[in-house]
Image: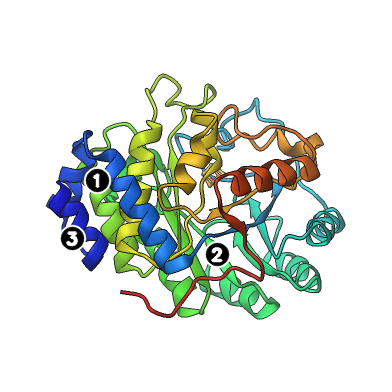
Amino acid sequence: MNDLIYKAETTHALNIDELTALLDASEYDEALFAAADRVRKKYVGDAVHLRGLIEFSNICRCFCMYCGLRCENKNAERYRLTEDEIVETARKAAEAGYRTIVLQSGEDAWFSAERMSSVIRRVKAFDVAVTLSVGERPFEDYKAFKDAGADRYLLRIETSDKALYESVHPHMSFENRVRCLKDLKTLGYEVGTGCLVGLPHQTSRHLAKDILFFKEIEADMIGIGPYIPHPQTPLRNEKGGDLIQAVKVMALTRLLLPTINIPATTAMETLAPNGQAKALQSGANVIMPNVTDPSVRKKYEIYPGKTPANPAEDARKETIGKILSLGRTIGTGFGGRIKAHSG
Ligand code: SF4
């Protein structure tokens, strides 16, 4: 296993059998995390980029079996911020120092290409990078968002195995998901994707395939989330994912894609109080503090226990303290993907 870790660190290439073997072994985890940390430092440095996350609508037309916002969850209290509220939240975040604003929602058709483009144009006026995470759309919508100034787009594949994908995404097609990612690449976005770790019937081979999928589509950002069952979903009785396995997938992703941006995800922190710190020491270089108004933040419950409803300024201070205590620095600038010296 140590030879495989060395190979990953020096060549950034492993095949599916090698990745699966590392995911199945447990006694080499610390060596794997340390290698991912070295690769992170060598290629993207010590800076941790902060992205201000605005969850502007929890209305969603989808049925994702694992998500508390699925349309069939009648207990979810739905909300949709107005355009002015979104822009005002972004303005405050930019003033607080965020250089990237992430606009995230369920698949809410009210935000037509025209409405969304208007929001993007107004947020871009604050001299920030804009990342969108608003789901599957036709090529024309993605083009309109890009023309309005959007820089990046997050759309997790969740799993790259078609059968597994379709088992947890009723009424959705794997092919359309991949089509969206390819359209976004074609349009020149920095594209973020990622997977859930711990889905029912998911194996380590599935996860190995996910990592190779990230490489194949040349993702610029990868978010890995341990799956946390939500009580108001059909998968409520499932076991869910494990923090260490999720961090292993993330560390292997860093080894194979050394120059990309990788967030220490909120789901990792939800599973363990030091989850994000562990991620930052195992390959991650991004954190996305939530800047949504605390009055609605609790309602964006994809999984239970997601985010503390503390004010945005406190979340930012806490996050910065955590980063500095690890001997890391705070990123300046937009923090886009480093294009040079990959390989
Ligand atoms: S995961 Fe996203 S698309 Fe699926 S139900 Fe939840 S909010 Fe909607």
Q: Residue furthest top?
A: 237
Residue 300 spot, x, y in % from top left: 66, 38
Amino acid type, callout 3 = Lys
Residue linked to disc 3: 7
At mark 3, the secondary structure is helix
Tell me if label 3 and label 2 are in contact, CB under 8 Å.
Answer: no
Q: How far apart are marks 1 and 3 (CA)?
A: 21 Å
Q: Nearer the viewer, mark 3 or mark 2?
A: 3
Which label's residue is closer to the chain start, 3 or 2? 3
Residue 306's place in the image compared with 89, above or below, is above
Q: Depth-wise, is mark 1 or mark 3 nearer the camera?
A: 3
Q: In this view, does 186 lie above or below 246?
A: below
Q: How far apart are marks 1 and 2 (CA)?
A: 24 Å
Kind of residue sitting beneath label 2: Tyr
Q: Quadrant of the C terminus?
A: bottom left
The residue located at (46%, 40%) in the rendering is: 278
Work out whether residue 218 can be spotted: yes
**Number of marks in the rendered image:** 3
Label 1: few (<14), some or many (≥20) within 10 Å?
some
Q: Say which quarter of the image contains residue 200.
A: top left
First-in-chain label (1 vs 2):
2
Q: Residue at x 38, y 23 (%)?
A: 238
Question: Looking at the rendering, which quadrant does residue 196 occupy?
Answer: top left
Q: Mark 2 points at which residue?
A: 153
Q: Is residue 340 left or right of residue 161?
A: right
Q: Where is residue 189 in the image (x, y as percent from the top left)?
A: 53, 74
Q: Is mark 2 on a helix, strand or loop?
A: strand
Q: Which mark is residue 183?
A: none
Residue under pointer 1: 206
